[in-house]
Every structure is written in C-alpha cells, then in structure tokens.
C-alpha cells in the first residue's frame, strides 16, 4: 500500500502504477529497465519541483525579513 500512495503522490498515473504493481511480487525490478528509467525520470521531475518550491520559499523568507512585498528602489 505504501508504494501506491508514494508513487501516486509523485505523479504516476494509475496506468503507470499498474505496470509497477504487475511485477512487484513476481519479478526483480532490474529485469525491467523501462520501469527503472520511468522511476529515474520521475525522481528527476520531483527534484526539479523541489528546487522550484525552494525558490518560492526563499522569496517568501526574503520578503518577510524585509517587511515589504514590493521591490526596494536603490
């Protein structure tokens, strides 16, 4: 169950999830390089999303510390 929740939260479609679950109990994942490639691509997408969210958090922290939402003119 944990794998389903985790993969769904990371953006896998139900059809993609089915591909992984079909082999989960019967096979070594390394026998399916296409699924490994999909997982690696999904991981990279998540890392990019995290970086974008970190940029937003940094901006919010900066604005809170400045006490102003507007750019300060030099």
Image (cartoon, rainbow, N blue to C red):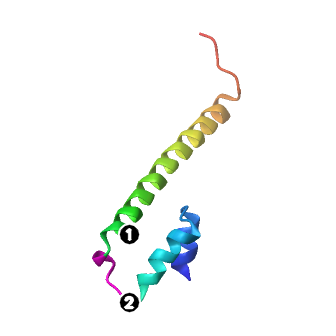
Residue in the picture at 48% in, 81% down: 21
User: What kind of element bears circle 2?
Assistant: loop
Dominant secondary structure of the residues highlighted in magenta in the image: helix
**Taking 40 as reference, is 70 left or right?**
right
Q: Which part of the image, by quadrant, shows the N terminus? A: bottom right
Residue situated in front as seen by the camera: 63 or 65: 63
Residues in magenta, as a range: 27-31
Question: Would you call the spot at circle 1 few (<14 residues within 10 Å), some (14-19), or many (20 or more)?
Answer: some
Give how far across and how far down residue 47 sits, in percent: 45, 52
Give how far across and how far down residue 51 sits, in percent: 48, 45
Mark 2–mark 1 CB contact (< 8 Å) = no
Q: Which mark is residue 26?
A: 2
User: What kind of element bears circle 1?
Assistant: helix
Residue in the picture at 54% in, 39% down: 55
| Residue located beneath label 1 in the image | 35
Residue in the picture at 41% in, 89% down: 25
Question: Would you call the spot at circle 2 few (<14 residues within 10 Å), some (14-19), or many (20 or more)?
Answer: few
Residue situated in front as seen by the camera: 53 or 70: 53
Between the C-alphas of marks 2 and 1, the distance is 14 Å
In magenta segment, residue 29: yes
Give how far across and how far down residue 53 sits, in percent: 56, 46
Q: Image height check: is 65 above or below 29? A: above
**Taking 45 as reference, is 63 left or right?**
right
Residue situated in front as seen by the camera: 22 or 6: 22
Q: Earlier in the sequence, mark 2 or mark 1?
A: 2
């Amino acid at each position: 169950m944990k794998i389903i929740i985790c993969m769904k939260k990371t953006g896998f479609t139900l059809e993609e999830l089915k591909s992984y679950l079909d082999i989960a109990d019967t096979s070594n994942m390394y026998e399916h390089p296409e699924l490994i490639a999909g997982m690696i691509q999904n991981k990279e997408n998540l890392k990019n999303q995290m970086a974008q969210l970190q940029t937003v958090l940094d901006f919010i922290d900066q604005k809170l510390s400045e006490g102003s939402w507007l750019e300060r003119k030099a």
